Amino acid sequence: MDKLEIQCLGTLSIKLNDRPIQEYMSGKAIGLLCFLVLNSEKVFGREKLVELFWGNSDYDAAKYNLRYSLWTLRKIFKNNDAEDVIVNVKNGCKVNDAYQVITDVQQLNNILSNVEEDSRHYEMLTLDDIHSIYQGEFFEGFYLKNCPEFNDWLFFQREKSQRDYFALLSKFADYLREKRLLDKCIQIYEEMININPLQEEWYIKLIQLYLELGDRKSALDRYERCCKVLREELDIGPMQELQKVYIQIKSDSNEKNVVDAAKIDPCDICEILEINEFDLRIRNEKRNGEKIVIHNLGRDFSQIDYGWMVDVMDTILDQVSSEIIKQRVPKHFMDDLVYLNMDLYDKGLVDEIKHEQIQVMPDIRLYKAMEKFMIHAAGYKKMVIGISEIGELDEKSYLWLSCLVSKKVHKNIQIVILDNKNEKIKGLKK
C-alpha cells in the first residue's frame, strides 16, 4: 500500500512513500491535492473544483487547467512508482481509498477526541507530543492568487486548527492542575497567550495559578500585561471577572500565602507546610541550581516496595555525576544498594553483581546504605526533598524516611512535606 504523508501545520511538507514530492508540484496542484486529502470522505464534482481554484478564469480555460493539474499529479505519482492518488468516480474526483493517508490535522483531531472520551489518555500525553504535531498555523505562509474561495477555505482551516490546538492545551492544563503540576500549567497558558494575547479567560487562569503558588508579583504582572494589550489593541478595559481577580491579588489574604524562603531555617531536617507554601518553596528551590531537588509530585509508589527510595536515588544520580558519587560513597554501601537499583551497575558505580546481592537483604542494612549514600551526596550539594503526597510512599520507603527524620542525619538534607492530614504525617510529627 502506498503511503502519503502531509504536514499541514507549520511549514508544508508532502511525502510519498517517505520521499518529498512538493518541490515538483505547482501551487495549485498542492492546493488541489491537499484539499481533496483533507476532505477524503467526500466526492467533488469537477465544476466545484474549477470554481474553487479557477473561478476567475474563462470556463473552458478553467476546465483545461483542472485536467492539466490532475495529469501533473498522476505523472508525479507514476514517476515515483505509486498508484494514482486521485481517482475519477461517477460524480467527480476523490482520494484513492487504497492509499494510507497520514496528516497532522487528523492526528490532532484524534488526540482531542481521545481525551474527550477518556481522560486516561492524558497519562500517555506530554506537551512535547502536542508540539510535535502542531508546529505552526495551517499551511503557514501559503496563498493562491486569484482563488478567493480556496483562500477562504484556508482561513477557515487555520482558525479551526488553532481552536482545536487551544482546546487540547486547555484540557491538558486542567488535567495537570488536578495533578498539582502547576509549573507546567503556567507554561501552557503563557504559550497560549503569546499566540493569542487577547483571550482574557486565559489571563484569569494564569493569574490564579500564580496566586496558588504564592507568586503575587507574577500574578500582578500578568494582569497589567492583559490591561495593556486590551487597551492598545481593542481600546477597552478588562472585563468584570478579571477586575475581581485583580482585587484578589491586592487583598491582604493573598499576602499571607506568600512564603519568604529566607526565613526558613536551613538546619531544620523536616518541615510540614500548607499547599501554597509547599509549591512556592519547591518552585524556589528548583531555580537554585546549587541544590539537589527531589520531588515526588504526582508519582504513586505505594504498591512497589522501596519504589520511592529508588526514585530518590535515581534523581540524585541525574544531578550528581557518577564520578563524584564513586569518589564519595564507600564501595560496600554501593554494593548493598545494587540490590535496590541495578542501574548502579550500568552506571559503573558497582564493579560486579554478586549472587548474594540479589537475594533478600535485611531492611536495616539497606536503610543504612541508603542513609550513607544520601549523606555523602549531601556533602557535595545541599539537598531538598519535596513530598507532595506522603500517602503515595510505599511502606518500606516511609519507614526509611521516618529513620531519616528522627535521626536528623545531616544539616544539608531538608525534607519539605505538604500537610494533607494523612496518618503518616502524624507519625512523622511525633
Image (cartoon, helix red, strand yellow):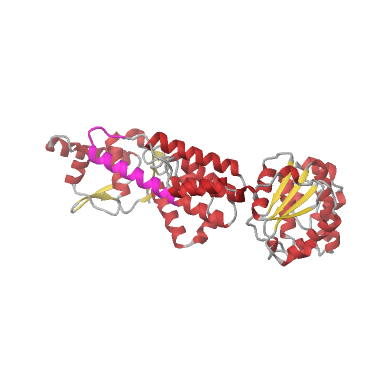
158 inside magenta stretch: yes
Camera sees residue 74: no
Camera sees residue 318: yes
Instruction: Give the overall secondary structure of the magenta segment.
Output: helix
Towards the viewer: 174 or 251? 251
Q: Residue at x 25, y 32 (%)?
A: 145
162 inside magenta stretch: yes
Towards the viewer: 121 or 26? 121
The magenta span reads: 143-167
Question: Where's residue 74, x and y in %?
Answer: 27, 41
Q: Residue at x 38, y 36 (%)?
A: 235
275 displayed left or right of 224: right
Question: Where's residue 397, x and y in %?
Answer: 76, 61
Residue 279 vs 118, above or below: the answer is: above
Q: Quadrant of the C terminus?
A: bottom right
Question: Where's residue 97, x and y in %?
Answer: 31, 54
Q: Residue at x 46, y 39 (%)?
A: 227
